[in-house]
């Protein structure tokens, strides 16, 4: 272990406990729902425990697992969704943290089978992009991780069919903020739908945004996946005016 790693691990534990509390206080999880993970400096993964309210964890409740999923450290059992977290972390070198929650509006879209692909809010398009809907997979099985794979290169947030939401980022705070953003987007799209009309951004608006945003360029510019000519979203189901 390199000098400073112990401090890093301790601060990561404290941050994970704090973000669990924020997820719970914001109503993005209830009871013992949800789970979080973060890559450790030695390549192992810190993960939340199974069967515990994530709003009331202590740093010592967290569990360390090997990349294989084997238990490495901690008195509790790792989250049953650890395979999903490991699949995302192993698939993408830039992913250092994952947050999984069941926020009510976004989960309602996942239950209704409606992805959040339309370009409606410029700041969401620029910072997060669209949110695809994965095929249904039984929670806790390896199929959940497999259901992400066709989207994993191009997206940082996923609606898990009939289940909830997963967000990926370079750190826990960013993964949490993406979760909040997905839920707020779902809430706004739902409210606009209830008003009877959802205006998507025009192709030109999205093109302008695309040219302004390095993230979109670096993420979608060189992709081989068939993508939208304007926002570079890979799913043909999304629309523009
Ligand atoms: Zn879940």
Image (cartoon, grey):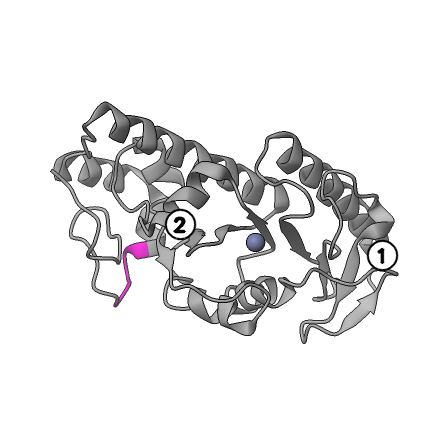
* Relative vertical location of residue 206 with respect to residue 7 in this rendering, above or below: above
* Relative vertical location of residue 65 with respect to residue 18 in this rendering, above or below: below
Decide: marks 2, 1 in contact (CB < 8 A)? no
Q: Is residue 222 magenta?
A: yes
Look at discs 2 and 1 and give the one toward the viewer: 2
Crowd band around label 1 with a 10 angstrom C-alpha radius: few (<14), some (14–19), many (20+): few
Q: Residue 195, position in %: x, y?
A: 24, 23
Secondary structure beneath label 1: loop
Tell me which segment is drawn in magenta. 220-224
Q: Which residue is mark 2?
A: 110
Going by the image, does 113 lie left or right of 50? left
Secondary structure beneath label 2: helix
What kind of secondary structure does the magenta stretch mostly adopt? loop
Going by the image, does 223 lie left or right of 142? left
Identify the image quadrant of the N terminus.
bottom right
Q: Which residue is mark 1?
A: 3
Q: Residue at x 57, y 37 (%)?
A: 28
Q: Quadrant of ligand 1?
A: bottom right
Residue 53 position by quadrant: top right
Residue 154 seen by the camera = no
In three-dimensional space, the C-alpha distance between marks 2 and 1, rounded to whole angstroms, equals 44 Å
Identify the image quadrant of the C terminus.
top left
Q: Earlier in the sequence, mark 2 or mark 1?
A: 1
* Relative vertical location of residue 147 with respect to residue 33 in this rendering, above or below: below
Q: Residue 129, position in %: x, y?
A: 35, 45
Residue 108 position by quadrant: top left
């Amino acid at each position: 272990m390199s000098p400073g790693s112990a401090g890093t691990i301790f601060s990561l534990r404290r941050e994970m406990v704090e973000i669990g509390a924020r997820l719970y206080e914001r109503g993005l999880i209830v009871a013992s729902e949800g789970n979080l993970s973060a890559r450790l400096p030695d390549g192992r993964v810190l993960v939340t425990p199974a069967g515990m309210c994530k709003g009331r964890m202590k740093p010592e409740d967290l569990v360390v697992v090997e990349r294989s999923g084997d238990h490495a450290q901690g008195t509790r059992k790792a989250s049953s969704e650890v395979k999903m977290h490991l699949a995302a972390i192993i698939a993408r070198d830039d992913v250092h943290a994952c947050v999984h929650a069941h926020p009510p509006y976004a989960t309602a879209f996942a239950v209704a089978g409606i992805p959040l692909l339309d370009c409606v809010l410029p700041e969401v398009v620029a910072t997060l992009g669209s949110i695809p809907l994965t095929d249904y997979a039984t929670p806790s099985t390896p199929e959940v991780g497999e259901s992400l794979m066709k989207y994993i290169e191009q997206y940082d947030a996923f609606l898990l069919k009939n289940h909830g939401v997963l967000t990926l980022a370079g750190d826990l705070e960013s993964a949490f903020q993406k979760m909040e953003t997905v839920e707020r987007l779902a809430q706004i799209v739902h409210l606009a739908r209830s008003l009877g009309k959802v205006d998507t951004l025009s192709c030109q608006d999205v093109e302008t945004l695309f040219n302004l945003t390095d993230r979109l360029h670096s993420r979608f510019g060189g992709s081989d996946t068939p993508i939208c000519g304007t926002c570079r979203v890979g799913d043909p189901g999304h629309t523009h005016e």
